[in-house]
Image (tube, rainbow, N blue to C red):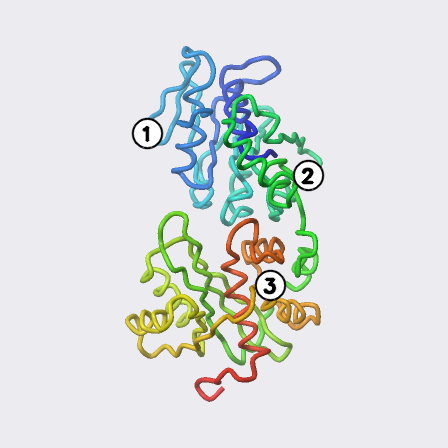
Amino acid sequence: MGGRGSGKTRAGAEWVRHLANKKGAFERVNSIALVGETMAEARAVMVEGPAGLLNVGPPEQRPLFDRSRNVLKWPNGVIAQLMSASEPDRFRGPQFGAAWCDEVAKWPNGEAAWDMLQFGLRLGKQPRQMVTTTPKPTRLLKRIVGDQRTVTTRMATRDNKANLAKSFLSEIVGRYEGTFLGRQELDGELIEDLPGSLWTRVALQSIRTDEKIALQRVLVSVDPAVSSHANSDACGIIVAAKTERGAIVLADYTLKPAPPMHWVRAVVGAYHKYEADAVVAEVNQGGDLVANLIAQVDPQVPVIAVRATRSKWIRAEPVAALYERSLIEHRSGLDELEDEMCAFGPNGLAGGHSPDRVDALVWALTTLLLDEQTPRVRGL
């Protein structure tokens, strides 16, 4: 586990190189899995990047890369297959003697991908794997670190300062050093909860339930993104319902930067899938745009417009109190939402970014349980 720029990728590439070339105490492994968050990231970082496998070690020991098959082949016949953690079912079939898993803390459906990989690690005398990641307190990473067979090495960004740009050290490291985000992203610390956070992981783990519950009123809540370029905020989309015990959060359909009609279709799709009663939409920045866009896809979908007049933190506090009173439950599989909840701070950010999932969550639960002025739709 290490900070940004600490040398994690180089460490992983050197480990694979030594396995493939049988160096020192390493047993040569003939079949290796290279697992990234996506196939594109595996290629760009683990293989073709400055510290990737095509750029480390003596030239005569470097593999050839078959881009059409996403396969690396070393001169001695050792094979490495690129795999995407975003597609766990593709792990069925292949078998390996070792695996290098990069940025595990970012893997979507991480536990499913990890579990499927374990079934394929069955070649040789000692199947093994190396994880290189900037830590986030996901269930998968905590599970790996807590395994008695895991050996953990930590690397801080400053440990590799000789190979980093001075501007990065002064502007980025200087700005975030000592902060919660800096401890995680620069020092490589696995931090469970943000000090003073409204939510804790222990508390959220205790409210998960998959039992069948009668739903009284279902809402799809959306915190719309105002732009769709690479650095835009995500569009928060949360499904929640009122129950006899309070409310339950059912699903998270949040999308990373996407064209407006993309997330609008996702909202309408969630509305129909859960037979929702209405869509709750924040209109501070888009005005009537959100309702108009939804009407273009399905004019029958009722929209409750909400407008923020207070800070994100102040809006979230009454909702956090509902959790403290054991009035809120979560379905399983809301890892990314729960990560953001535990990283949400008084500055209105979560891990340095806009808390789009938390925003949508707050609007949904506020409308269901706290806002007596919210019009009830469909006679509910």
Q: Residue 68: horizontal and vertical position, in percent? A: 30, 31
Give the residue pinned by disc 1.
Answer: 67
Mark 3 Cα shell of 10 Å, populated few (<14), some (14-19), many (≥20): some
Identify the element where label 1 is drawn: loop
> Label 1 vs label 2: CA separation?
35 Å
Marks 2 & 3, CB-CB < 8 Å contact: no
- Identify the mark at residue 24; answer none if there is no mark: none
- Amino acid on which the number 2 mark rests in the picture: Asp
Give the residue pinned by disc 2.
Answer: 147
* Looking at the image, residue 15 lies above or below residue 227: above
Q: Earlier in the sequence, mark 1 or mark 2?
A: 1
Identify the element where label 3 is drawn: helix
Residue drawn where x is 57% and y is 18% of the image: 27
The mark closer to the camera, 1 or 3, is 3
Q: Nearer the viewer, residue 230 or 68?
A: 230
Q: Earlier in the sequence, mark 1 or mark 3?
A: 1
Q: Nearer the viewer, residue 13 or 148?
A: 13
Q: Earlier in the sequence, mark 2 or mark 3?
A: 2
Residue drawn where x is 58% and y is 40% of the image: 175
Residue drawn where x is 68% and y is 39% of the image: 147
Residue 369 is left or right of residue 236, and the answer is right
- Amino acid on which the number 1 mark rests in the picture: Arg
> Label 2 vs label 3: CA separation?
36 Å
Marks 1 & 2, CB-CB < 8 Å contact: no
* Looking at the image, residue 150 lies above or below residue 116: above
Residue 27 is left or right of residue 149, and the answer is left
- Identify the mark at residue 313; answer none if there is no mark: 3
Q: Residue 302: horizontal and vertical position, in percent? A: 39, 79
